[in-house]
Amino acid sequence: MQIFKLFFKVSRSKIGIGILYTVIFFAICFPMVNASEEKVDFQDTSLSLYIRDEDQTEASKALVAELAKKHHITDKQLTNQELMDAMYYSMIDYSLVIPKGYAELLGSTDKESLKKELFEEFHLRDGFATAMMSVYLQEYIRNTRMAIAMGDDVMTAVNKAADREETTVEVVQDPQDEMFDENFTTKFAWFFRMLLYIMIAVIISMLGPILITMNGEEQRKRIECSRTSVSSYVTQVFTGSAVLVVIVWLIFLAGGAALYGGMYTGVNSWLAVLNSFIFSLFVTMFTIFLSTFRPSNTVMSMMAQVMGLGMAFLCGGFMPQTMLGEGVRTVTKILPGFWYERANDLLCGDQKGTHGDVFICFAVQGGFILLFLILTIIKSSMHPKAKVKKKK
């Protein structure tokens, strides 16, 4: 076990960079993941409105009363200059003028009347709330005119439009259509999604320089002088690499458990754990393959960053794959990171599929592991022929 002990003796000098990456990752990951747990829903926002009702009919008063249910309406009469000043200082968000003839124009269904504007709207600052107000007014008028076209009088149509705006629709996800698992939360999915980059960065940055040192000329000469066979050397190096990677993987899983709030539960959660382990094996095998070329530590570190950031951005490490373009998703299918992130998206419901699709993602990643294992064996067997010096 001398080679195995030497492996971890060399790893002591490389452990600092792994700790640095880990601390930075969790310092960024914890607030981002906690923020991803918050539900982002559309909510009604109360605006400060200034309404000038010049029509003073039952229909116009009904509209004012409807708006007053959700918004604050200023009672004070303002001049145009006072209104502009109030909007400038954000005392009023939205101005609405209901001109004379509003009720008559609302009840008319001829083409010329439908083309005319029913309101004079004005707001100083664009935003979601003001945009929603404009949409609300358009929907209110559309629903009212629809009821009038079906034979209702103006006030009946106005009341129906108001009732329709109060209708709420509950959207329920059918668990049979998705791989639904209430234990696999959005927060947990985001953790595993971002784990792609950090596993690449830590494993290549730590394991790469260790393997380069172990495969160096000095170590090779020592091994040739010892009784250690080549097969025993390779086995011990592979064992040391596996132990190191498993330790790194378990550290990140422990951090994920802290985010999760305890031990993982549910089938999807454990499938995500298995997915991360398979991807860790790929990164390990890829690092071993890279080390056979004996690049410098600087080059290895650069490759870790390029591969980690590139695969994270292109394969969905920092966003769901559904937000990527169709062309990007098609091209990145040749990368193992695509299948790792696809499995995560399937498990959390961002993509539709079954557990069979998840196991396909596992199999594809396993194919990449096998590919680089074969390439590593081929590259290692290509020893340069020794040069024989001729005696003069």
Image: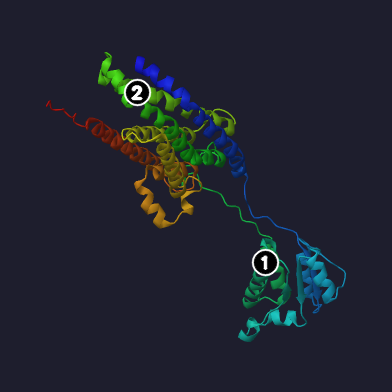
Tell me the CA gap for discs 1 and 2. 67 Å
| Residue 232 shows up from this direction | no
- Residue 206's label in the rendered image is none
Residue positioned 42% across, 46% down in the render: 353
Q: Quadrant of residue 158?
A: bottom right
CB under 8 Å between callouts 1 and 2?
no
Coloring scheme used: rainbow
Image quarter of the N terminus = top left
Residue 113: give x, y in percent of width and height: 65, 84
The residue nearer to you, when weighing 341 against 146, is 341
SS class of the residue under badge 1? Answer: helix
Extreme-right residue of the structure: 76
| Residue 10 shows up from this direction | yes
Q: Is residue 226 left or right of residue 276?
A: left
Image quarter of the C terminus = top left
The residue nearer to you, when weighing 349 against 237, is 237
Residue 5: give x, y in percent of width and height: 39, 16
Residue 342: give x, y in percent of width and height: 42, 45
Q: Is residue 300 left or right of residue 100?
A: left
- Residue 237's label in the rendered image is 2
